[in-house]
Image: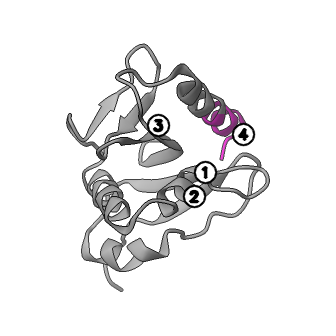
Amino acid sequence: MGPEFGRLECVAARPASPRIIFPCLRNLIRLHSIEMQLIFFRTARGDEPARDYIDSLSPSEQETIEALLIELGRKGYLPFPFARKLKGVEKLWELRPGRHRVIYFYYQGNKAVLLHAFKKQSQKTPEKEIEVARQRMSMITRGGV
């Protein structure tokens, strides 16, 4: 059997079985040995807000984000300017592909959970966007996915 490769999954606010998502990345993932599992947060209704946001972007913007996600999965960490820890916010990081932001946190050692994505329109990350990510992170850490 070949080497194990990382998977992209979803984490639900309520326990649900994870599934491979982001089909456009499936072939790219097989090209790279991924150390970190990338997981999209899933709401109780089954929505995947970060994935839905990324899917709504132009193909070139999607490619940029996908490339950063692959690197994050492969390396487990991306340096500034590609990602950075949100100042004053415990455990939250932001992926920084151009004018877009994907907020994530590290979970159980080898997982990065993609909580929220949005278009950044000001110098500082808006508090309401951070609060959405905090609430989603809290649902996951309390639910023990």
Query: Which of the labelled discs sits on residue 143, or is there none?
Result: 4
Q: Secondary structure at mark 4?
A: helix
Q: Residue at x 54, y 69 (%)?
A: 21
Left or right, 42 with reference to 107: right
- Measure the C-alpha gap from mark 2 to mark 3: 18 Å
Of 138 and 22, the residue lying toward us = 22
Segment colored magenta: 136-145
- Contact? badges 2 and 1 (CB < 8 Å): yes
Query: Which of the labelled discs sits on residue 52, or is there none?
Result: 2
The residue positioned farthest toward the bottom in the image shown: 1
Q: Residue at x 50, y 46 (%)?
A: 113
Which residue in the protein does label 3 denote?
A: 105
Q: Residue at x 36, y 70 (%)?
A: 5
Of 65 and 17, the residue lying toward us = 65
Which residue in the protein does label 1 denote?
A: 49
| Picture colour scheme | one colour
- Measure the C-alpha gap from mark 3 to mark 1: 15 Å
